[in-house]
Amino acid sequence: MSTIIEAKDFTWQYINTSRPALKNINLAIDEGKFIGIIGPNGSGKTTLAYSLDGLIPGQYNGIKKGEVNIFGIEVEKYAKGDLQRCVGVVFSDPEAQFTAMTVEDELVFGMENLGMGIPEIKERLAWVTDLVELEPLLMKPPYEISGGQKQRVALAAVLAMTPQVIILDEPTSMLDPISRKRVFAVLEKLKQESKNTIIVIEHSLENLIPLTDNLIFLLDGELLLQDEPHHFFRHMPMLLEKGIHPPGVLRFFYELAKAGYAEDALPFTVEEAAAMLNNVVNKGIVKV
């Protein structure tokens, strides 16, 4: 599997700030992977997302060192608009992306800008409408639907243009738990059915972790940890110390394993946790 995103000694500092937003970032992301980026507010997550889409340095003033390569090409070497054809971004505030008067027009807008023909637009519109379950909303103004529906429309508008890389910047930050689960259900379906590389910046670890192939932890602009989930959470003491609070079930089984009452593996879903706890109880190691 090929590496399609690579940052080499990448540093970015916004104009009129006292320190870099990102410092000496080195990372590689393979094609088709689902990546989660976590970290407290101000850790550089959004700056990294914008750097992968060319918004930095394209739309922001600052000092850049190192390089960011997408499909082997440094982002600054792409002609205007070319990088955005293969890297799509869904922002935390979906209304910031809306330009049309109906949901259907919103979904079609990006495809028309790419110069797609009517048959292809119709085919993609039908596909993305079914994928994200938007059929009842197509004729409604995007500004008048619920927050969860808005986020799904914003995601669908990006998916309709079929970029190879999809970046979501805190897509559920303003949503209630039910709407949050619906957005992640779409992402799960997308992971199963497509070959897209998906990068999600998210605070809701309970929904994010089961989908990820790799997790990246940023703190104060530095990349502290990048690993697949089972290895990532073996650094539990460091994560807790740095303000990352994994779902309770993960911490519970980490403590069980640490005390010798369970295997070293960690569960990432309720179903996995139930099976593992049942196994521990059946072995008579822990009495409940």
Image (cartoon, helix red, strand yellow):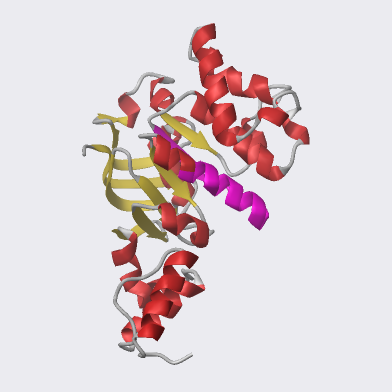
Confirm whether residue 212 shows in the render.
yes
As for residue 170 lying within the magenta part, the answer is yes
Percent of width and height locating residue 21: 43, 51
User: Compared to 254, does 55 lie above or below?
Assistant: above
Asked where in the image residue 133 lies, by quadrant, the reply is top right
User: Compared to 15, does 110 lie above or below?
Assistant: above
Asked where in the image residue 164 lies, by quadrant, the reply is top left
Confirm whether residue 62 shows in the render.
no
Q: Residue at x 48, y 14 (%)?
A: 114
Asked where in the image residue 257 lies, by quadrant, the reply is bottom left
Q: Is residue 53 left or right of residue 108?
A: left
User: Compared to 105, does 49 lie above or below?
Assistant: below
User: Compared to 254, does 207 lie above or below?
Assistant: above
Q: Residue at x 38, y 51 (%)?
A: 22
Percent of width and height locating residue 36: 41, 52
Q: Is residue 155 left or right of residue 217?
A: right
Percent of width and height locating residue 134: 65, 32
**Residue situated furthest left in the rendering:** 1
The region drawn magenta spans: 165-188
Percent of width and height locating residue 191: 41, 41
As for residue 185 lying within the magenta part, the answer is yes
